[in-house]
Image (cartoon, coloured by chain):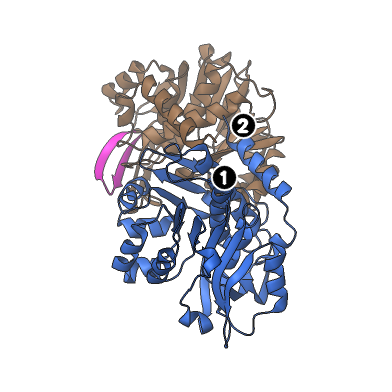
Chain colours: A blue, B brown
C-alpha cells in the first residue's frame, strides 16, 4: 500500500567531527521518503526552487519515489546549515533560509488523495491539517512535530494531532508537549490528546512505543561509527511508516504493540542507524533491503531473552 | 550456590527532589547483598564501627545474609552524604567520612574461602585482589570499580581485573577505562584486558552485555516515580550476580549471551529499578520474589518482537 510523505526537501550544510559538507540533499521529507522506499511505494509532497539539481531528482526517482507532488517554483530551495558537538549529541544551527519553503501550501495531486497511509513531516500544524483534510481514504495517518510548534502554536497543534493515528516525536518534545518530565506519565497524557499510538525517539538510546494497553521498548543500535546523525529521526519515521504501509496495518491491529507495530519500531531503529553511517543521504545510495533485514535480525539476537 | 560480596557498609545522607534523609543504611556491599539475597545465599565481607545499629544488623539478617565477615571495630561507620539534581541524573557529594573504612583490610572467614561466586564491590583494586586471592574454589568472580581507580590506580586496576570473569561498570567508566568514546569499541578493548564478560550499566537507559562472540542489550525500566537512585547500580550488580549464583553459571556457559547471562542482566535491571522506588534500602523491606518475577515478565513483554 502506498505512503504519502509531506515535509521539507532541502539542501543542508553539515559539519561533524568527521568532516564538513557545504551543500547536500536533505530535508525531513527526503529522509522519510528514502527510508520508507525500501518497504512500500512512496509519494512525496514538497516544494523546491529552480536550483534543485537534476541529479537529486534522479536519485529520488531511482528509489521509485513518486514526485508528482514535488512542486518546483522560482527561487531557491530551503537551506539549513548546522554544526555538531564533538560527541554529536548537540548541534547548533548556523543558518536557516526558508526560501521557497516559506510559501509552501501543499496541494495534493489527484492521484495522492485516495492513498491509505500518510506521514506528515515536521511542518506548521495548520499545513499538516490541510494535507490530511485533502485525503479521503486514510487508514493510518500521523506525523512528527517539534519544540517550536509545541511552544508557540500549542492550540493549533493540539487541534491537528487530535485526528492522528500516531504521533512520532523525541523525548524532550514528549516532555514539553505533556508538561511532565517522567516519560511514562508524559506518554499517558499524550495518548489522551488523540493519537492511539505514540512513538518516542530517544536518539542513541532507542525508542519507546506506547498505546493505552501497554508499551514496547527497544534500545538503540550500537554503531561503531556515527558520521552524521542528520536525518536519523526522519529515517526512523520512514522505516516505521514504510513498514506499516507494507503490512497494510490498521490502527486497530490487535491492541498494543501488535507484532506489526513492534516490528515497525525495529525497522525505524534500523533505518535511523543506517542513516548515521554516512553523510547526509549517502548511505541510501548503496543500502540494500538484505542489509536492512540483517540488521533487523541482529536487533532480535541482541535483545531476545 | 553461595555468593560472597565485598564492599562498603555505610550510613548515607541523601537529598532528592522527593525529600531528605539525614542518616540511613547504605554502602555498596549492603545494596549488592540485599538485592542478591532474593536469589542465592549471600555472605558479606565489610567493616562497620561501634555505632552500627542493631536494627540494621537485624534487617540484613532478616534477609538471610551471612554476617560472619562483617567486622565491627571501634570508631564510626563510613558516612557519605550527597544531593541529587532536579532530574536526578547528577549528584553532588557533600561529605565523605571514611572513618573505620579507611583501615579496611578484608580477611575472609574460613567458611567463605571455598565459596564459588564472588562480587567485589567498588573498593581499592589491591584490596579486591587480596580478597580474590583468599578464595580457593572460584567459579565466577568479578566486580565493579570507579573513575578514581581508573584514573589514579590504573596499573593496579589492570592487574586486578585481568583475572576476573566479569567486570560491571557504568558507561562513563567504560569509556575512561578503554580510552575510547564509542561504547562498542570500548567494550572490545576492555574484553582484551581479561574479563570474558563485560556489563555496562547506562542508568535510566538500561544495560549492555558484551562477550567476544557478541552482545546483548536491554533498555531501562520505565519507572513512574524515582524517589532515590542511590544504590541502583549496586542493586543491578546484586541481581546479576545473585541470579548467576542461583543458576550455578560458569564463565564458559554456551558462549555469549547464554540464556543465563541474559536473564542475569534482566534481573540486574529489575533489582536496580526497584531500588529507586523508595529511599535508600527501604524498598527491600517489603519487596517479594513474586514482585521481582512479575517485573522480569514485564521486561519480556515490553521487549519481545
Q: Nearer the viewer, residue B96 or A251?
A: A251
Give the label on residue A247, or none: 1
Above or below, comparing residue A149 to residue B288 in the picture: below
Please identify the residue farthest to the right as the structure is shown: A286
Chain to which mark 2 belongs:
B
x and y, in percent, of residue B230 in the image: 38, 40
Locate residue B246 relative to residue B161 in the image: left or right. left
Q: Looking at this view, is A144 or B6 the one in front?
A: A144
Q: CA distance from mark 1 to mark 2?
A: 43 Å
Residue furthest toward the bottom? A74
Q: Quadrant of the N terminus of chain B?
A: top right
Residue at horizontal 50 percent and vertical 32 percent from the top? B121
Relative vertical location of residue A248 with respect to residue B120 in this rendering, above or below: below
Locate the C terminus of chain B by quadrant.
Answer: top right
Magenta span: predominant SS is: strand
Q: Where in the figure is residue B131, as x and y percent of width and height? A: 57, 25
Would residue A104 be found to the left or right of residue A73 on screen?
A: left
Confirm whether circles 1 and 2 share one chain.
no
Which quadrant holds residue B115? top right
- Is residue B16 one of those drawn in magenta? yes
Within 10 Å of the Cα at label 1, are there few (<14), some (14-19), or many (20+) other Cα atoms? some
Q: Which mark is residue B166?
A: 2
Q: Residue A141 placed where, x, y %? A: 45, 56
Q: Residue at x 34, y 59 (%)?
A: A177
Q: Which residues are magenta?
A: B11-25
Residue B86 shows in the view? yes
Q: Nearer the viewer, mark 1 or mark 2?
A: 1
Amino acid at each position: 500500500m502506498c505512503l504519502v510523505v509531506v515535509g521539507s526537501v532541502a539542501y543542508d550544510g553539515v559539519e561533524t567531527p568527521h568532516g564538513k559538507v557545504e551543500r547536500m540533499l536533505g530535508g525531513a521529507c527526503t529522509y522519510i521518503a528514502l527510508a520508507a522506499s525500501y518497504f512500500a511505494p512512496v509519494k512525496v509532497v514538497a516544494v523546491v526552487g529552480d536550483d534543485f539539481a537534476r541529479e537529486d531528482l534522479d536519485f529520488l526517482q531511482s528509489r521509485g519515489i513518486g514526485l508528482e507532488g514535488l512542486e518546483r517554483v522560482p527561487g531557491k530551495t530551503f537551506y539549513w546549515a548546522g554544526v555538531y558537538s564533538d560527541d554529536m549529541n548537540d548541534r547548533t544551527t548556523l543558518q536557516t533560509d526558508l526560501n521557497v519553503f516559506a510559501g509552501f501550501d501543499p496541494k495534493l495531486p489527484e492521484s495522492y488523495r485516495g492513498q491509505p497511509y500518510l506521514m506528515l513531516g515536521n511542518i506548521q500544524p495548520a499545513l499538516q491539517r490541510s494535507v490530511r483534510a485533502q485525503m479521503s481514504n486514510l487508514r493510518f495517518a500521523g506525523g512528527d512535530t517539534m519544540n517550536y510548534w509545541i511552544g508557540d502554536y500549542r492550540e493549533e497543534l493540539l487541534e491537528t494531532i487530535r485526528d492522528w493515528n500516531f504521533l512520532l516525536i523525541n523525548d524532550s518534545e514528549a516532555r514539553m508537549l505533556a508538561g511532565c518530565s517522567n516519560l511514562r506519565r508524559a506518554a499517558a497524557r499524550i495518548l489522551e490528546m488523540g493519537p492511539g499510538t505514540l512513538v518516542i525517539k530517544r536518539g542513541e538510546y532507542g525508542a519507546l512505543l506506547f498505546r493505552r494497553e501497554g508499551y514496547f521498548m527497544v534500545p538503540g543500535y550500537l554503531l561503531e561509527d556515527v558520521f552524521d546523525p542528520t536525518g536519523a529521526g526522519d529515517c526512523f519515521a520512514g522505516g516505521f511508516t514504510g513498514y506499516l504501509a507494507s503490512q497494510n496495518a490498521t490502527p486497530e491491529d490487535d491492541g498494543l504493540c501488535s507484532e506489526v507495530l513492534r516490528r515497525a519500531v525495529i525497522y525505524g531503529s534500523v533505518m535511523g542507524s543506517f542513516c548515521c553511517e554516512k553523510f547526509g543521504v549517502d548511505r541510501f545510495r548503496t543500502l540494500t533491503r538484505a542489509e536492512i533485514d540483517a540488521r533487523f535480525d541482529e536487533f532480535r539476537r541482541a535483545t531476545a531473552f
